[in-house]
Amino acid sequence: MAQPKILLVDDEESMIRFLSIMLKKEGYEIRAVSSGMEALKTLQTWSADVVISDICMPEMSGIQLLAGIKAIDAGIPVILLTAYASQESAIEAVNMGAFHYLIKQARNDEIKMVVRNALAIRKVKSENTKLRRQIKTDSSLESIIGSSEAMQRIFTIVRRIADTDSTILISGESGTGKELIARALHYTSSRADKPFVSINCGALPENLLESELFGHVKGSFTGAVRDKEGLFKVAQSGTIFLDEVGEVCQSLQVKLLRALQEKEFLPVGATETIKVDVRVLAATNRNLEEEVARGTFRADLYYRLNVIPLVVPPLRERRDDIPLLIKHFMEKMSSKRGLENKVISSQAISVLSEYDWPGNVRELENVLERTVILEEKDHVDVSSLPEIVLNRSRQNSQSLFEGTPRATLEDLEKEYLLKVLDSVDWQKKKASIILGINASTLYRKIQRYDLDKKKQHALAE
């Protein structure tokens, strides 16, 4: 483990010597300079974790040095020392961003404690910075796997529209990676350093969804024991992503429309509206034009959401990407604890590439993870693959996609739901896990398509 680095700045040699001896005994790497200019020059090539500086020095004071350090690295904690402490100078130092302010006559234990606290703060800030950088990297376009022409078109559009404030409606089947596209839009935009807030509109009942989106005031309903900020407020200056927006009930659609049009909303039980600056991205696996025609989705909200439409193609329409995705997921799983680094045969890749993947990328990842975990051999071949993939590969069977080229998205979704439900003997919780959707969303889809185990078996007979 690397030694924490501390830079000492003082024109008084005896003070430098005293601090160096004391802090080296604590296990710190020490560098010492006698002026603020030397300190700034040192920090250009040497990364200090903490700076301890005298406040009264010729040519450059500790306050001036503090400003220079913040310009180089705002995360470095600076501890200022003085022989003559005053409340005014202490307040000025803290207001300028100093971590702490001590008199030179402070006890050794006090100095050591302040240094330990400063290092702890530095570590937390450094970890948070790395985490934010990792999130941004994981959410970039480069993190989305796809070299096919269809995906390259998506990437081109995302780059073109990312830095606008336009509302984007991302359409596509379940499991195609709509949220990945939404994150890429946010982290490629000028709002990248602001919040990205995501909510699945199909995962919550109507009353809870309204409270989650817009917040509520204390006492507005049973259980509202305190005020709650809604996600629109949490996402201030950033982006809110409304996944499965087609599941929003009509009464809530009105309130959502106002938030989009007026950039304001009324929390549940409140009497005053709240103004927000939020970019809205929405996603749906439904055909909202058909929902509008049926009268189940408001036309004005649809047109407000659909300012720039973005359609993510299903995996079966970009089969060239399947080998890349397989490689990516196999590498990802091999890094997980307890999973061996297994090689997959070219024949298995070929079979996987021929399967139509009605659950898209999410289904592919789930199948690979299940296969790798259950396979006892040190490699994955065709015999390792689940029956559903082998039975429905294009070489071995006719699929709905080939047999009925005019089948609608709803037909495909209904067929896939039935097959998954049948495969788990209609255990809905298991089916929702395989499908990668919430149980409540599955129940709604079963009702919507009028699916019933007994009825389906009767029709089959």
Image: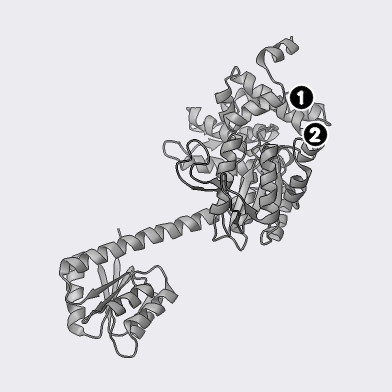
Find numbered disc 2 in the image and state the secondary structure of the residue it sits on.
Answer: helix
Residue drawn at (75%, 35%) of the image: 296
Indicate how the structure is coloured in the image: one colour
| Image mark for residue 448 | none
Q: Amino acid at mark 2?
A: Arg
Is residue 142 visible in the rendered image? The answer is: no
Against 278, residue 7 (above or below) is below
In the foreground, 3 or 425: 425
Question: Which numbered mark, 1 or 2, is in the foreground of this view?
Answer: 2
- Screen quadrant of the C terminus: top right
- Screen quadrant of the N terminus: bottom left
Q: Is residue 45 left or right of residue 428?
A: left
Q: Residue 341: x, y in percent? A: 48, 39
**Residue that label 1 marks:** 398
Q: Residue 310: x, y in percent? A: 73, 49
Q: Amino acid at mark 1?
A: Gln
Q: Identify the mark nearer the N-term, 1 or 2.
A: 2
Q: Badge 1: how crowded within 10 Å, few (<14), some, or many (20+)? A: few
Q: Badge 2: how crowded within 10 Å, few (<14), some, or many (20+)? A: few
In the foreground, 308 or 407: 308
Q: Is residue 327 left or right of residue 39?
A: right
Which of the 4 image quadrants contains residue 185? bottom right
Question: Could you tell me how many numbered marks the image carries?
Answer: 2
Residue drawn at (67%, 17%) of the image: 452
Q: CA distance from mark 1 to mark 2?
A: 32 Å
Q: Residue furthest right?
A: 406
**Residue that label 2 marks:** 294
Q: Residue 49: x, y in percent? A: 33, 68
Q: Is residue 422 left or right of residue 39?
A: right
Is residue 409 visible in the rendered image? The answer is: yes
Which of the 4 image quadrants contains residue 67? bottom left
Residue drawn at (37%, 71%) of the image: 47
